[in-house]
Amino acid sequence: MHKIEFKDNDSEALGLITLSIGRRQKAEEQLDIYSPPYMDGELVEHTGKYKPYERNIEFLVTDENQISILNKWLDGYGKLTTFKDPGGYFKAHVIGQVTYDELVRIREKVSVNFKINPPFFYLDSGDV
């Protein structure tokens, strides 16, 4: 079964069914591109800085009594681990609103945007 961990809490233990975990992306370097006058082509400067990206994760809430606990969990910054990326984690911020959409009478779908910043995958063996 799909699951994630965020801030050392497991989504399954909180009564969530993970519907989608978004896509992992390759870190994109921020480039400075200049077009000097009287020159054919462009000058490209590699800055060594990388752009963060957003990863949307969706859950199905099985117990509405857990919503206040979920709101506290899905706040701030922490380590994000997914079942698709074993052996490591991402440093992630929860950004924007955590939205709840009622699907059926007793189930709600939760949508969360994580900003992966810095945009790298860190091994469990260390922050290298």
Image (tube, rainbow, N blue to C red):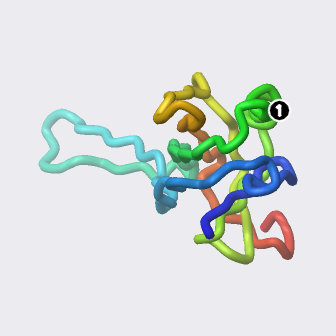
Of residues 62 and 74, which is closer to you in this image?
Answer: 62
Q: Where is residue 88 in the image (x, y as percent from the top left)?
A: 73, 70
63 lies left or right of 46 = right
Name the image quarter holding the N terminus: bottom right
Of residues 50 and 124, which is closer to you in this image?
Answer: 124
| Number of marks present in the image shown | 1
55 lies left or right of 66 = left
Quarter of the view holding residue 109: top right
Q: Where is residue 84 in the image (x, y as percent from the top left)?
A: 59, 71
Q: Helix, strand or loop at disc 1?
A: helix
Quarter of the view holding residue 60: top right
Quarter of the view holding residue 97: top right
Identified at 62% across, 54% down, the residue is 17
Q: Can you name the residue that lies furthest to the top here?
A: 97
Name the image quarter holding the C terminus: bottom right
Is residue 75 shown to the viewer in this render?
A: no
Of residues 30 and 120, which is closer to you in this image?
Answer: 120
Relative to 107, say whether 72 is above or below: above
Identified at 78% across, 52% down, the residue is 79
Relative to 67, say whether 31 is above or below: below
Q: Where is residue 2 in the image (x, y as percent from the top left)?
A: 61, 65
Identified at 33% across, 42% down, the residue is 33
Say which amino acid is labelled 1.
Ile
Q: Position of residue 75 (x, y in %)?
A: 76, 31
Q: Disc 1 designates what residue?
A: 69
Is residue 103 shown to the viewer in this render?
A: yes
Of residues 100 and 51, which is closer to you in this image?
Answer: 100
Decide: few, some or many residues near mark 1? Use Cα within 10 Å; few <14, some 14-19, many ≥20: few
Relative to 99, say whether 73 is above or below: below
